[in-house]
Amino acid sequence: MAAASTSQGVQQAWSALVKGVRTAVLLTLRNGRPFGSHVPYVFGSDWTRAYLHLSRLALHTQHLLDDPRVSLFIAETDGPEKNPLALRRLNLQGEAAIFSPDAPTYEQIKRRYLERFPQAEMMFSFGDFALWELRLAEAHVVLGFGQAFASTAATPSRWVHQKVNQPSRRKERSSEELLS
């Protein structure tokens, strides 16, 4: 993939990524430690809102009920012909809340979810399932080597190129030196 040098280019690249990758890793907190689950998702009008259809019986839902802080990680599918270190990926952080069926956009989001995941239709009638809204505050997208960009919910279509921090000039110490 060619370098994305503009916010519009980054926007197009992350949009293409999420269009082609239908599941993400949802990271919740379990006893203060990250816990990952594979989940289907849809986005709202931009990356600042994502929607998941979750069962209350799932561990990740129990975690969200205890602590709403969340991360959603979406990555390009790996393959033998690809360099796994250069795969496109999107990492989002924010908080989760149950999306009320009384919300003005609930039916629209449900319809979009079912268009993408028609197999989930029956589960919308199950009492333990609910739509959850991820209110995402920060985004970090990697489009390849040297192509990392960040954005915030305040300016979701503005992507800032992330420069690599220069490593410390301090001499690295071996494990033997640390033990002596």
Image (cartoon, grey):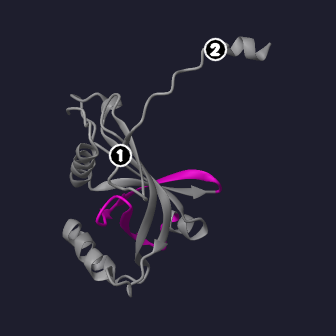
Residue found 19% across the figure and 70% down from its top: 115
Residue of label 2: 172
Q: Quadrant of residue 48?
A: bottom left
Image coordinates for residue 87, horizontal then vertical, percent? 30, 35
The reply to whether discs 1 and 2 touch (Cβ–Cβ < 8 Å) is no
Q: Vertically, is 54 above or below 82? A: below
**Residue 36 on the magenta span:** yes
Is 3 on the left-hand or right-hand side of 54? left
Is 13 on the left-hand or right-hand side of 157? left
Q: Quadrant of the C terminus?
A: top right
Of residue 96 and residue 180, the one placed in the foreground of this image is: 96
**Residue 94 on the magenta span:** no
Front of the two marks 1 and 2: 1
Is 20 on the left-hand or right-hand side of 64? left
Among numbered discs 1 and 2, the one appearing first in the sequence = 1
Q: Which residues are magenta?
A: 31-59
Image coordinates for residue 89, horizontal then vertical, percent? 34, 43
Amino acid, disc 1 = Trp
Residue of label 1: 159
Q: Vertically, is 109 above or below 159? A: below
Q: Quadrant of residue 53?
A: bottom left
